[in-house]
Image (cartoon, helix red, strand yellow):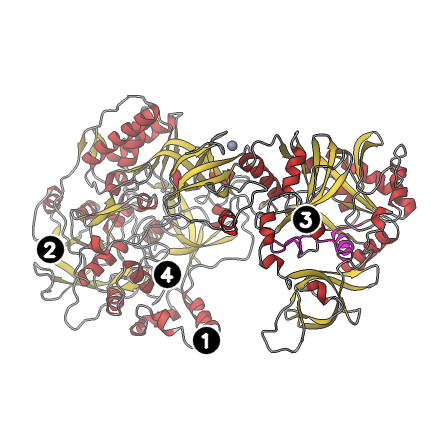
């Protein structure tokens, strides 16, 4: 079970959190004309990396904040956690 | 025969406390402090079971967790528990145990015939023989194997015992209380670290309980007792015996199972039988010790053949002799301790040492005691079926390939020692690397992955002096890192015997013309010949050899067999062991009972139950409940002998005719507040929200980004910057997370907050043509007319003095209102509605009637919004704004979503107007078409239309709109039904929606 540092609450056990997907994906702006490919990349296409991955987690049984986790998908090592507006 | 193998004085048992117990129906006496194994051996019992494959007689091999044979069925406090290790089960008054895996009895075992047929049961036998013909598997092979080869028996009764979970945090977790564990725990605790010390046995001390050493002028055991006493008194230390750390997981979380009452006749009230500890440790010291390796020779699984360390433990801890004519077979010095211990207790052992004559402290001591030692001798074969009677022994050549003349030695037990295997399971589970140590012919941890340090014999350090030095240092360094304290403890001086080098020899060659079975894995009956066969058949990877032969796959996880198996593979392959590598260690280290894993989450405690504030009223009024997620909702209110069909029909009819009231508390409710709330809703929902006036509700549909409908519901503007959103019961939690994601991650510039208010409000839907009259009675001061409170209107008011919200919204398609009050007033509201509704013939209605009403109106719900449908599929195109963008809009342009023959919602009526269509039925053109019959779509929901008094269903079918009027078939292969149907509009009742606006 992972030990995850919520940027708002501190270190908590994994069972307080929900996984929220790839955090490098940016939603296209509203009302912007975009190609099918750009949209598909946003909705569907994910790399499923082995190694370092920036991903969203949701402190669902805690402060209910979404935040970013920089984690190795193979070793589960967590390098850093960030607020949504922070960059690596 | 009363404890004739019990010594007069030796041991840590309490001879003043006699304990009577039963094994296989016969009564025996043991002492307090015995295990079931030690008490049976004291009584001369060595035959306790049968092996898994060949049903060969099985005795005892070890004295603890490594035991591969002695699994018993335990009866304790009227409960029967399978697969208990007799070597771990402590004796208590009235204990009852039975052999497992023997049918009809341990002495006459029908499966023993497998032993004579073993030539037909080689490696991979199950794969080869039982695979064909396939149909035989279920009918013939499997029942036979089950009957003849099962381990213990489980009952179908509920486990009445209590199991608990506990979460704990510490600086240092120490796994094992032998010398290395005690030293590191003590050193770290004295330096201020918060320490947990776990010992799987009842007694602390590990090897110090049985070894002849001195630490700081005390015996090893005295020193261990002193350290434990001191640790127990320290406030920063938790010391647990009967506690096995069995799993090492990510981020330094370890799981430990503590056995609290299994050593007692029954559990005290409210005291758990086992407690599962989830321990998050900053640092871990793995001091799990080592397990003695067997030597491999003919019929080396015969009862009476034990590990030499186990024989010593039975004498020194339990005061029990495993035999009176012992033969000791070794390739190293440690078996000499066992020989000396026998001699000290007046028994004359014979030692066979595979090595060339050599000397060491221990060997010299044995010689001085006139112990008969034969160097360069090996056991070739053990004779005796149910118990060892004699051994064929021979001199062995220096290269260990040639045997001399076979001699026979009478003996009643053979104690074997093939040197030691460090217990590296936890270190390996943590993800750490291992390396093969040529010095000890075994793997030891090399590179740690997590914060773990292995010390003592688990790390391949077999002398006490180094063990203590390293362990004191480890405890000090690790604690210093955490506490920043600098209190270093002096390492006590050690007196121990120097040992000589062990022999790499481990497997005795077969004499010419003999085909003795030489076993590697004692629990799964894997012999040398099985591994040889697997390699001949082309298996190379050790992981494949393991699976094909089942080596190391039994419940003991190969604790005694793995290394010898590796040695054999590497010998045959002409490789060195590290090239072959070892199989992966996975948790749990020892079997863990399911009860401990489940903990308190059993029965109705397996998940929380959510009840509305009106629940008691529903119960009193004969509600039959249904699970809706975690909620319990009334499905219908039973009158007399009514069936579900009768009751829901009556309730639905009453809504259409008079007025009904339904508990809608379970609907998800979310407060949306802030100056940008309207803009936010406009992005979340598919329809327009910017112009919704205060005091008005609107129906909305929200999508996922992939264009699929996520949820629907009404949202009401309570005040300028305050909206009250409702969601379906099922999606409430997901919708909240979804909204939070967009507010926190995607559009943080929007000044909006959301919070769940589901539990703050009790809701009652009042529906039916007479609902306005009833509402007026309940709220006399409110103008309930169509003008005063129009469709989709909202007002705040008082219900007999309590704050209430009235929403004029409808799910049933009738004139309807939803009244919300604070949860505490829910029951008050409900009773008022029912009381005042009497004159209008009000009836409560449950979810079944609610479904009927919505289905015949063509309102979509979870069965249509099933995570696969777009708004178009559900005929909700009127709610798709063309002017603005919203979540998921771009996906709606997808070719597949706008294909002309895309599946769409329709109504379905059986032609005979009688036969109900099972939900999930396929709609097809031709009922008799060749299979697979092309499917047009499926029936999503069915009801008995109370408006037309015939069955009606909703279906989502290809090119739906154009199918209206067509005669098709609904097929339900599950119910074996083929029903001719007509496709109609999904809006079966009141298609123009006049009633809700009346
Ligand atoms: Zn948090």
The image's mark for residue B136 is: 1
Assess disc 4: are there few (<14), some (14-19) or many (≥20) residues with their C-alpha within 10 Å of its C-alpha: many
The percent position of residue B258, horizontal first and vertical second, equals: 43, 41
Depicted B985 relative to depicted B884: above or below = below
Q: Identify the residue under disc 3.
A: B880
Considering only order in the chain, which callout, 2 or 3, is on the residue closer to the N terminus? 2
| Viewer-proximal residue among B733 and B865 | B865
Task: Tell me whether the residue at label 2 lies in contact with that at label 4, contact meaning CB atoms closer than 8 angstroms.
Answer: no
CA–CA distance in space, label 2 to label 4: 33 Å
Q: Identify the residue under disc 4.
A: B49
| Viewer-proximal residue among B679 and B517 | B679
Assess disc 1: are there few (<14), some (14-19) or many (≥20) residues with their C-alpha within 10 Å of its C-alpha: few
The percent position of residue B845, horizontal first and vertical second, equals: 79, 50
CA–CA distance in space, label 2 to label 1: 54 Å
Residue B209 appears anywhere in the view = yes
CA–CA distance in space, label 3 to label 1: 59 Å
Q: Where are the magenta residues, as a range?
A: B845-872
The percent position of residue B180, horizontal first and vertical second, equals: 27, 36
Q: Is mark 4 on a helix, strand or loop?
A: strand
Considering only order in the chain, which callout, 4 or 2, is on the residue closer to the N terminus? 4
Considering only order in the chain, which callout, 1 or 2, is on the residue closer to the N terminus? 1
Q: Residue furthest right?
A: B839
Question: Which one is in front in this view, the residue at disc 3 or the one at disc 2?
Answer: 3
Quadrant assignment, res B409: bottom left
- Residue B851 sits inside the magenta stretch: yes
Q: Numbered disc 2: what chain?
A: B
The percent position of residue B924, horizontal first and vertical second, equals: 66, 71
- Residue B338 sits inside the magenta stretch: no
Task: Tell me whether the residue at label 3 lies in contact with that at label 1, contact meaning CB atoms closer than 8 angstroms.
Answer: no
Q: Identify the residue under disc 2.
A: B374
Residue drawn at 67 percent across, 75 percent down: B927
């Amino acid at each position: 079970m992972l030990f995850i540092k919520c940027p708002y609450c501190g270190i908590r056990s994994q069972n307080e959190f929900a996984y929220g997907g790839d955090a490098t994906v940016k939603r296209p702006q509203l009302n912007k004309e975009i190609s099918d490919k750009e949209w598909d990349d946003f909705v569907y296409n994910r790399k499923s990396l082995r190694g370092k991955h920036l991903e969203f987690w949701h402190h669902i049984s805690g402060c209910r904040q979404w935040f970013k986790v920089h984690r190795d998908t193979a070793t589960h090592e967590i390098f850093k956690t960030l607020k949504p507006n922070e960059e690596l | 025969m009363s404890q004739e193998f019990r010594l007069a004085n030796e041991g840590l048992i309490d001879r003043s406390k006699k304990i009577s117990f039963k094994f296989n129906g016969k009564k025996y006496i043991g002492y307090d402090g015995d295990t079931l194994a030690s008490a049976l051996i004291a009584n001369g019992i060595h035959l306790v079971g049968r092996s898994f494959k060949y049903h060969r007689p099985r005795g005892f091999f070890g004295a603890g967790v490594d035991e591969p044979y002695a699994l018993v069925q335990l009866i304790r406090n009227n409960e029967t528990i399978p697969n208990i290790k007799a070597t771990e089960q402590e004796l208590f008054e009235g204990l009852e145990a039975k052999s497992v895996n023997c049918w009809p009895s341990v002495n006459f075992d029908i499966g023993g015939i497998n032993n004579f047929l073993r030539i037909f049961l080689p490696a991979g036998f199950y794969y080869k023989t039982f695979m064909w013909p396939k149909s035989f598997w279920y009918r013939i092979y499997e029942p036979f194997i089950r009957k003849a080869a099962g381990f213990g028996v489980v009952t179908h009764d509920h486990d009445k015992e209590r199991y608990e979970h506990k979460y704990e945090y510490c600086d240092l977790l120490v796994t094992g209380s032998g010398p290395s564990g005690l030293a590191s725990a003590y050193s770290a605790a004295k330096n201020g670290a918060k320490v947990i010390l776990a010992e799987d046995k009842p007694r602390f001390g590990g090897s110090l309980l049985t070894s002849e050493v001195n630490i700081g002028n005390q015996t090893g055991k005295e020193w261990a007792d002193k350290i434990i006493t001191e640790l127990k008194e320290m406030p920063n230390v938790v010391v647990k015996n009967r506690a096995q750390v069995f799993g090492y997981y990510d981020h330094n979380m370890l799981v430990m199972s503590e056995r609290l009452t299994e050593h007692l006749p029954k559990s005290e009230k409210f005291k758990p039988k086992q407690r599962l500890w989830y321990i998050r440790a900053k640092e871990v010291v793995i001091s799990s010790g080592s397990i003695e390796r067997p030597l491999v020779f003919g019929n080396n699984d015969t009862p009476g053949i034990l590990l030499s360390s186990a024989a010593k433990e039975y004498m020194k801890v339990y005061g029990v002799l495993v035999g009176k004519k012992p033969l000791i077979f070794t390739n190293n010095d440690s078996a000499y301790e066992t020989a000396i211990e026998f001699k000290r207790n007046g028994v004359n052992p014979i030692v066979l040492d595979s090595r060339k004559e050599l000397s060491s402290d221990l060997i010299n001591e044995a010689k001085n005691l006139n112990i008969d030692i034969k160097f360069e001798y090996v056991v070739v074969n053990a004779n005796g079926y149910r118990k060892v009677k004699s051994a064929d022994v021979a001199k062995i050549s220096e290269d260990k390939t040639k045997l001399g003349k076979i001699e026979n030695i009478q003996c009643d037990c053979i104690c074997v020692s093939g040197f030691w295997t460090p217990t590296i399971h936890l270190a390996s589970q943590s993800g750490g690397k291992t390396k093969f140590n040529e010095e000890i012919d075994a793997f030891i941890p090399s590179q740690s992955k997590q914060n773990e340090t292995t010390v003592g014999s688990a790390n391949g350090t077999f002398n006490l002096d180094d063990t203590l030095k390293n362990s004191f240092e480890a405890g000090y360094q690790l604690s210093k890192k955490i506490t920043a304290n600098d209190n270093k403890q002096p390492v006590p001086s050690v007196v121990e015997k120097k040992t000589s080098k062990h022999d790499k020899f481990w497997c005795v060659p077969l004499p010419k013309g003999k085909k003795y079975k030489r076993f590697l894995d004692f629990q799964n009956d894997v012999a040398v010949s099985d591994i040889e066969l697997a390699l001949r058949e082309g298996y190379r990877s050790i992981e494949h050899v393991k699976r094909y032969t089942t080596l190391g796959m039994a419940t003991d996880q190969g604790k005694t067999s793995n290394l010898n198996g590796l040695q054999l593979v590497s010998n045959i392959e002409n490789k060195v062991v590290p090239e072959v590598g070892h199989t992966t260690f996975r948790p749990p280290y020892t079997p863990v009972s399911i009860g401990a894993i489940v903990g308190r989450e059993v029965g109705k405690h397996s998940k929380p139950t959510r009840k509305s504030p009106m629940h008691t009223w529903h119960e009193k009024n004969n509600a039959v409940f249904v699970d809706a997620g975690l909620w319990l909702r009334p499905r219908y209110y039973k009158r007399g002998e009514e069936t579900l069909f009768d009751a829901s029909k009556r309730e639905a009819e009453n809504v259409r005719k008079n007025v009904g009231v339904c508990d809608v508390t379970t609907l998800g409710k979310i407060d949306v507040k802030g100056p940008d709330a309207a803009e936010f809703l406009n992005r979340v929902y598919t329809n327009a929200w910017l112009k919704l006036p205060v005091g008005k509700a609107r129906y909305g549909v929200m999508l996922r980004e992939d264009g699929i409908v996520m949820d629907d519901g009404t949202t009401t503007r309570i005040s300028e910057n305050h909206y009250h959103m409702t969601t379906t019961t099922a999606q409430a939690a997901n919708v909240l997370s979804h909204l939070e994601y967009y507010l926190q991650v995607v559009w943080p510039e929007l000044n909006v907050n959301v919070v769940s208010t589901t539990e703050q409000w009790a809701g009652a839907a009042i529906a039916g043509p007479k609902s306005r009259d009833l509402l007026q009675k309940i709220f006399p001061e409110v103008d309930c007319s169509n003008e005063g409170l129009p469709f989709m209107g909202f007002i705040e008011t008082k219900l007999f003095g309590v704050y209430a919200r009235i929403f004029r919204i409808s799910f049933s398609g009738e004139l309807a209102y939803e009244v919300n009050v604070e949860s505490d007033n829910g029951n008050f509201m409900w009773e008022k509605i029912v009381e005042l509704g009497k004159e209008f013939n009000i009836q409560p209605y449950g979810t079944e009637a609610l479904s009927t009403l919505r289905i015949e109106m063509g309102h979509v719900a979870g069965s249509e919004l099933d995570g696969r449908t777009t708004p178009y599929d559900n005929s909700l195109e009127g709610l798709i704004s063309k002017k603005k963008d919203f979540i998921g809009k771009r996906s709606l342009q997808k070719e597949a979503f706008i294909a002309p023959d895309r599946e769409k919602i329709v109504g379905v009526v059986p032609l005979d107007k009688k036969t109900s269509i099972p939900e999930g039925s396929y709609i097809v053109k031709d009922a008799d078409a060749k299979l697979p019959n092309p499917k047009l779509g499926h029936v999503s929901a069915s009801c008995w239309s109370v408006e037309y008094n015939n069955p009606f269903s909703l279906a989502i079918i290809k090119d739906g709109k154009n199918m209206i009027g067509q005669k098709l078939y609904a097929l339900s292969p599950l119910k074996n039904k083929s029903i001719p149907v007509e496709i109609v509009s999904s809006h079966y009742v009141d298609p123009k929606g006049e009633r809700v606006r009346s």
